[in-house]
Image (cartoon, rainbow, N blue to C red):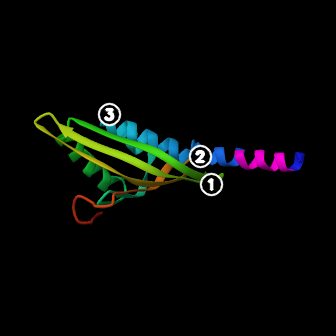
Amino acid sequence: MKLVACVALSIAAVTAAFAQDSGKASVLADKLGDAFQKSDLQGINDVVAKNAAVYWISQKYFGQVAFDKYLRGQFDSDDHRTLSFNPDGGVEDETISTSWGTFGFTTSNSNNPISSQLIGRYTAIATEVDGKWRIISIHLSVSNPPDGPTIIN
């Protein structure tokens, strides 16, 4: 009976560990969201690798330069923006970390009372780059993207 109880407790502990995704990829995604909300391009560049693949809702950006160009446009055109991540789970070891779940993305402008709000799924992958953990791939998707897919290099 004690063996069954020990096995049940072990399974519960492992399940709880996966449900509370506090892995490196999840933490970096939260930092990305905070920096996005503050229009902090340097903060974003601190958590996203220079050669990262960013699949941003309906567009693909390969590398920091292309992604930065998009972000500058967002920061110039919208007064308010939020990006929040709600992880469902994640897995990591010493070399790679993953996180997945849902995200919320909103933008608005004081000159235009209509705001844009998207809710979808995300996957983030992080690894150590130049001695610091960074996101090397992040994929945000919605069931009906606002525009057709675009690849930006």
How packed is label 1: few (under 14 Cα within 10 Å), some, or many (20 or more)?
A: few
* Residue type, label 1: Thr
2 or 1: tag closer to the N-terminus: 2
* Residue at disc 2, secondary structure: helix
Residue that extends furthest to the left in the rendered view of this protein? 111
Task: Label 1: state its secondary structure.
Answer: loop
Q: Nearer the viewer, mark 3 or mark 1?
A: 3
Number of callouts in the render? 3
Left or right placement of residue 61 versus residue 19 in this view: left
Residue farthest along the front direction in this orientation: 1
Amino acid under label 3? Lys
Which residue is located at x 60 percent, y 53 percent?
91
Q: Which residues are magenta?
A: 4-12
Element assignment for label 3: loop
CA separation in Å, label 3 and label 2: 28 Å
Magenta-span inclusion, residue 8: yes
For label 3, count other residues whose C-alpha is less than 10 Å away and answer few (under 14), some (14-19) or many (20+): some
Residue 81 percent location from the top left of the image: 27, 39
Q: Is residue 110 above or below residue 71?
A: above
Snapshot quadrant of residue 141: bottom left
Circle 2 residue: 19
